[in-house]
Amino acid sequence: MLDPRSLLERAAEQRLPCELMPRAHTEWARATVERVERGGVVVRGAEGLVSGADVRCWIRVDGIPYAFDASVVRTAVPVSDRSESGVMLGFIDHWEVAERAPQALAIEALPPTGGPVSLLGGAIQIVELEPNVWTVTTPADAPLIFVEGGSLRLRLSPEEGPAMEITARVRRLTHGSGHLLYALAIQQVDDPDRYADLVGAVRISLGL
């Protein structure tokens, strides 16, 4: 018999990625399980959700994929990055084992304030990826995302397995012709071997 609370508590302990789809939408949004409270489960990074929205959720715990229904009980919930980008999900129901291919690899920056910033696709791109330094480009007219000399977290969410977060510092900001280049120096990695494997997989995926 499924024990949803126990599964969500394990997901929170490991900060596992999950995916949410509001009713009547066709795209999944990636988030991270933060903690379990009496009123429900808090996730971080689920932008665009509003209170009262019904969502379908997908998560893989201990290698088993699960799906369940929930409602957005509260938004603007404080989370571990000291922002209020969390969402509390309550009225959790209809748990089931459900095979659904997760979204592709996601790489995000987690600034000290505000929600996650995707580094794949769109105007923001990783152009060089070395174990010690990542180089990210944005259009010159885009607002500054990172402050030179500032610290931030980076999150790698593979297609399979838990997400991994590392600490980085903005070593250098260079103004190029029509673009900005950020050099993100990696400062702290809790699992160097897994990090090396993920960097290698990302390099192959991005053709770097």
Image (cartoon, grey):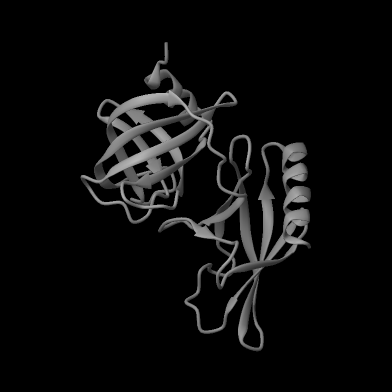
Q: Residue furthest bottom?
A: 177
* Residue 64 relative to residue 50: left or right: right
Residue closer to the observer: 118 or 150 = 118
Return the x and y of residue 176 as percentages of the image width and height.
66, 85
Return the x and y of residue 63 as percentages of the image width and height.
60, 26
The quadrant the N terminus occupies is top left
* Total numbered circles: 0
* Residue 82 relative to residue 100: left or right: left
> In percent of the image, x 76 and y 56: which residue is there?
203
Return the x and y of residue 71 as percentages of the image width and height.
26, 38
* Residue 43 relative to residue 154: left or right: left
Q: Which residue lies furthest to the top in this view?
A: 1
In the displayed structure, 110 sits above or below 188; it is below
The quadrant the C terminus occupies is bottom right
> In percent of the image, x 34 and y 26: which residue is there?
94
In the displayed structure, 59 sits above or below 140; it is above
Return the x and y of residue 125 as percentages of the image width and height.
63, 68
The quadrant in which residue 140 appears is bottom right
In the displayed structure, 152 sits above or below 196; it is below
> In percent of the image, x 39 and y 40: which residue is there?
43
> In percent of the image, x 70 and y 36: which residue is there?
191
